[in-house]
Image (cartoon, coloured by chain):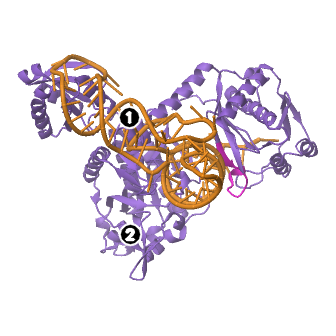
Amino acid sequence: MSDKPAERYEDSELYKIRHSAAHVMAQAVLEMFPGQAKIAIGPPIADGFYYDFDLPRALTPDDLEAIEKRMRQIISGRHPFKRQEVSAEAARAQFRDQPYKLELIDGLEAGGSDEYGNPLADKPVISFYTQDTFTDLCRGPHVEHTGQINPSAFKLLSIAGAYWRGDPDRPQLQRIYGTAWKTADELEQYLWKIEEAKKRDHRKLGKELDLFSVSDEVGPGLILWHPKGARVRVIVEDFSRKAHLENGYEWVFSPHIGRGHLWETSGHLGFYKDSMYAPMDIEGEAYYAKPMNCPFHIAIFKSRPRSYRDLPRRYAEYGTVYRYEQSGVLHGLTRVRGFTQDDAHIFCRPDQVEEEIRRALDFSLYVLRAMGLTDFKAYLATRPEKYVGEIADWGMAIEALRQAVESARVPYQLDEGGGAFYGPKIDLKVNDALGREWQLSTIQFDFNMPARFGLEYTGEDGQPKRPYMVHRALLGSMERFMGVLIEHYAGAFPLWLAPVQAVLIPIADRHVAYAQQVAERLQALEFRVEVDQRSERMQAKIRDAQLQKVPFMLVVGDKEAEAGAVSVRRRTGEDLKAKSLDEFVALAKSEL
RNA sequence: GCCCUCGUAGCUCAGUCGGCAGAGCAUUCCCUUGGUAAGGGAAAGGUCAUGAGUUCAAAUCUCAUCGAGGGCUCCA
């Protein structure tokens, strides 16, 4: 982590530029719909800004161009941003036709409140900022004049619906997103990153590389794994399963449905029902598809009396769960309705907790690093206002989590009060090749379930004791993780993960037999190879293998057949020339 | 779920003002048998997402349904 504190975004020049660009955009939109446009709010955001409007008609991409054009005119006017402090009365007069502003003024006059509705200590000053013909209720700050917005370093990006104050019961507004930078170069770079992200989109690559699909017929949010995608997933799963077994986990399996009574005991029907599917009736009794695996692992723990000597028990499973997600939030592999967690539950004694957490975190980092992800950040979420269990237990658990993160040397942030009501947790997020953050691992204490299910073990003193329980998932959901992997590698999986590691490319039909011989020998060594025996030109076969991002292309013609060799080309375009089969095997093995 | 945009061949996409359903790639067949990113030709391939409506006539206009994409408090 950097040693000097970074400038707060809110204090930066860029923040002012973006905020000012939002005002200029609002002016342009108001002019487009004189007397009809209602303006809401327009703050700077991570890479740009937005402004929400209530307009008489829906905006189109063409409107964006027109608005941009007008914005450039306003910018060239070098209009100063003038600040003015006013009374609530004056503010109401100014915005008498702007209901959203009036609502904001009411809020300000009432003293202001934060997002939890708690009043703020200081009553904020009401201020206006005016540029050219446009005045907005605004705290500021802004640049000095519109000329300080670089007209070739901003761009309007998209139109989206957004609720007033994020409340689905309030009017839906039209939001225009824009991005703004200091220089045209920075804008360029940002747009490049967006483009690159589009190219890497796992939904696009999933189709192009024939990895998975989602079918209308089957249903939204339900993933079909095609042979190549499944091959990658199986490699990941096999690797992880082996690692689990080596790290003291015991593999278990559990069913996809369970009786309603189970979910009542677990509390899911109380707290989680909105995310569960309607029950199915089996001989007059309600059964539910599982949204989580924990009750089953608990049932395994409870299946016989446990001694303190038996602990810890670590049950792991690739458990497929089903959760109701609203249709609008479904997204490729990352937000789905049925997915498989690499789930495990650890039952242990209080004196084992610290060690168990440390092991779980180290294990998680080990597996993720093996997958080629190296840039992590941990979030330690502590006790929220509403919680179950004893404060002392919480304190001890949080301390164990903190020790683990610190000893793992992962940068972490405290998420004060961000834990679940049943326990504190560590979430591990990774940054992928494009620097985008994904949440993968989670390690969560649970002070709720052991009590609800009455879990016990017999202590050294012969007395029943309650075990601690820890949920953890490393890759999270296999679906989402595969999506992250696809985007991280842009579909060009490293050799050990590649669904097809090498394609044999016979130059002419008479070389097909030799190509097949070679393929069989490589397959016997457990390489994943295919023979492209189409009656196509070698160039075309190379191109196709290249587009499929196959790591090695092995060209075989007369020379190779005679010498028992293959001509090796990498997907990078590098030509390694002819190598004996043994040489190639040695090379490939060294890169696994 | 809600708002906007969209849904045409396996894929990517044209289709003007309502007037015969199109291209490239992929597939199949034929020719070609080659040396590191697309050889040539032919054929086949369609419930224009689904259903209703308007019209002499609908891929095109209207409504509904299904599905996809973007977004839905980073808060004046």
Task: Classify mark 2: helix, strand or loop.
Answer: strand
What mark, if any, has residue A327 been given in the picture? none
At 74% from the left edge and 21% from the top edge, which residue is drawn? A148
CA gap, disc 2 and disc 1: 36 Å
Chain to which mark 1 belongs = A
Q: Amino acid at mark 1?
A: Tyr
- The residue furthest left is A562
- Do labels 2 and 1 touch, CB within 8 Å? no
Chain seen in purple: A
- Answer whether residue A161 is magenta in the image: yes
Q: Give, as a single range, the part of the protein colored magenta.
A: A160-171
Q: Colour of chain B?
A: orange
What mark, if any, has residue A489 been given in the picture? 1
- Identify the residue position indicated by label 2 in the image: A257
In percent of width and height, residue B9 lies at 40, 44
Give whichever of A388, A275 is nearer the camera.
A275
Q: Is residue A28 above or below residue A163?
A: above
